[in-house]
C-alpha cells in the first residue's frame, strides 16, 4: 500500500545536505547529515502512514541500522520473527517450580539458548526460576531487570529476544522502549 519513489528519497537527501548543521570537521558533518536525514526520512514518511504502522517503521529503521553496525545478526532477527524453528522433539526438562512456563515458551527458551551468546540463559532459567517468574508476573515486564548477570550480558535487542520467549504479549511496549533507547 505504501510506495515511495526514488525521486522522493533523493529530494529528502538533498534537503538534508542543505538544512543539516554544517561543520568543517568531516566526521561531525557526516554525523549531522546522518542524523538529519534519518529524522527527516522518519518524519516525512510518518506523515503518510496509518498510526498503527509507525511503530513498525521505527522498529525496522532501528533494526536495519543495528544490522548495518553488526549489532544484530541474521540468526537473532530470524528468532525475533519466528521464535526459532524446532528441529527435533528433544527438550530438557523444565526446572522445578516452573509450572508458569508454557511448553511453547520453554521450547523457545531452549532454542534461544542454542544461539551464540545465549548459552547461559538456559542455566539461568534452571537455577533461578523464581527470579524469572518475577519478570513473567510483572505488569510491565519490559521494564524489569534481568536476573543476576543477565542484565549486563545482553544488549537491548537481545533482551527483546528473551522477553519474546517469556511474555510475547508485551512485545509492542518492549519494541517502543527499544526504539526510544536506540533512536530517541
Image (cartoon, rainbow, N blue to C red):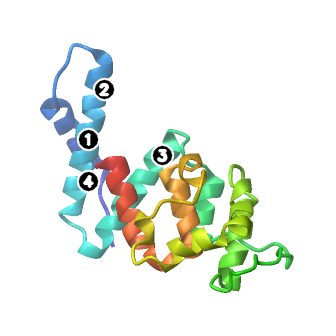
Q: Which residue corresponds to the image point at 56% horizontal and 48% vertical from the top-left?
A: 72
Q: Quadrant of residue 83?
A: bottom right
Q: CA distance from mark 3 to mark 1?
A: 17 Å
Q: Which residue is mark 2?
A: 30
How many numbered marks appear?
4
Q: Is residue 101 above or below residue 142?
A: below
Q: Position of residue 57 (x, y in %)?
A: 35, 61
| Eye-nearest disc, 4 or 3 | 3
| Sequence-wise first label, 3 or 1 | 1
Is residue 140 something one can see in this rendering?
Answer: yes
Q: CA distance from mark 4 to mark 3?
A: 16 Å
Q: Which residue is mark 1?
A: 37
Q: Which residue is mark 4?
A: 42
Label 4–label 2 contact, CB within 8 A: no
Secondary structure type for disc 4: helix
| Sequence-wise first label, 4 or 1 | 1
Q: CA distance from mark 3 to mark 2?
A: 18 Å
Secondary structure type for disc 3: helix
Q: CA distance from mark 4 to mark 2?
A: 18 Å
| Sequence-wise first label, 3 or 2 | 2
Identify the disc placed on residue 20.
none
Q: Position of residue 77 (x, y in %)?
A: 58, 58
| Eye-nearest disc, 3 or 2 | 3
Q: CA distance from mark 4 to mark 1?
A: 8 Å
| Eye-nearest disc, 3 or 1 | 3
| Sequence-wise first label, 4 or 3 | 4
Q: CA distance from mark 2 to mark 1?
A: 10 Å
Label 2–label 1 contact, CB within 8 A: no
| Sequence-wise first label, 2 or 1 | 2
Q: Is residue 38 above or below residue 118?
A: above
Q: Which residue is mark 3?
A: 66
Amino acid at each position: 500500500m505504501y510506495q515511495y519513489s526514488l525521486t522522493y528519497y533523493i529530494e529528502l537527501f538533498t534537503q538534508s545536505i542543505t538544512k543539516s548543521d554544517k561543520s568543517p570537521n568531516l566526521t561531525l558533518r557526516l554525523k549531522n547529515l546522518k542524523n538529519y536525514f534519518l529524522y527527516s526520512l522518519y518524519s516525512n514518511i510518518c506523515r503518510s502512514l496509518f498510526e498503527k504502522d509507525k511503530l513498525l517503521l521505527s522498529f525496522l529503521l532501528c533494526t536495519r541500522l543495528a544490522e548495518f553496525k553488526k549489532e544484530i545478526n541474521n540468526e537473532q532477527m530470524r528468532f525475533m520473527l519466528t521464535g526459532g524453528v524446532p528441529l527435533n522433539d528433544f527438550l530438557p526438562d523444565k526446572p522445578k517450580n516452573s509450572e508458569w512456563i508454557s511448553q511453547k515458551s520453554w521450547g523457545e527458551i531452549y532454542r534461544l539458548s542454542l544461539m551464540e551468546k545465549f548459552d547461559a540463559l538456559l542455566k539461568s532459567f534452571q537455577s533461578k526460576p523464581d527470579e524469572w517468574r518475577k519478570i513473567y508476573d510483572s505488569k510491565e515486564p519490559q521494564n524489569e531487570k534481568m536476573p543476576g548477570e543477565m542484565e549486563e550480558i545482553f544488549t537491548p535487542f537481545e533482551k527483546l529476544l528473551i522477553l519474546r520467549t517469556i511474555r510475547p504479549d508485551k512485545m509492542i511496549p518492549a519494541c517502543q522502549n527499544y526504539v526510544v533507547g536506540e533512536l530517541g
